[in-house]
Image: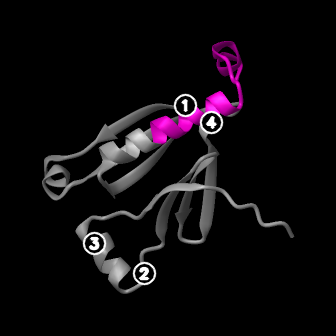
Amino acid sequence: MDIVETEILWTGRPSNLIQKILTLFHLNFTKYVITKDEIIVHRFFKKNSYKLYLLKGLKVTSTVFQRGIGIGNVSVEIEDELGINKVSLINIRKPLDVKKILRDAIEDDIMDRTITYKDKIRL
């Protein structure tokens, strides 16, 4: 079995009060990883990965309470042959920084794959 090493750009977990307590007792089973090729979302025993070149529509949202403690949500639309889906990185620290990391990673992935605007429309 070949192990493929990918460059990890960011990794994080939900950071609200309940999630911090769960993490303290090693019961927080949600983890987000952004690599140079994909977003990986680990929830409980399920792992979903999404290719960066399929992502579009980055959006950061946060409530007044979330802003007060420095967390927020990053939502991303995924456009593939099955339609448009939405993935959210919920209650993460420094959501604007994560959005910038993700935006730059998407642009780099598209440039590396030499995907043109016409190719992106056909997806």
Disc 2 marks a residue whose amino acid type is Leu
Mark 2 or mark 1, earlier in chain: 2
Q: Are marks 3 and 2 in contact (CB under 8 Å)?
A: no
Q: Which residue is mark 1?
A: 107
Disc 3 marks a residue whose amino acid type is Ile
Residue at the spot 39% in from the left edge and 47% down from the top edge: 98
Q: Measured from the top left, where is residue 12 in percent x and y?
A: 42, 62
Is residue 70 toward the left or the right of residue 11 in the image? left
SS state under label 2: loop
Residue at the spot 40% in from the left edge and 64% down from the top edge: 13
Q: Which residue is mark 2?
A: 27
Query: Gap between marks 3 and 4, in whole Å?
Result: 35 Å
Q: Establish if 87 lies above or below 43.
A: above
Q: Measured from the top left, where is residue 74 in percent x and y?
A: 38, 44
Query: Gap between marks 1 and 3, in whole Å?
Result: 34 Å
Q: Establish if 71 lies above or below 27.
A: above
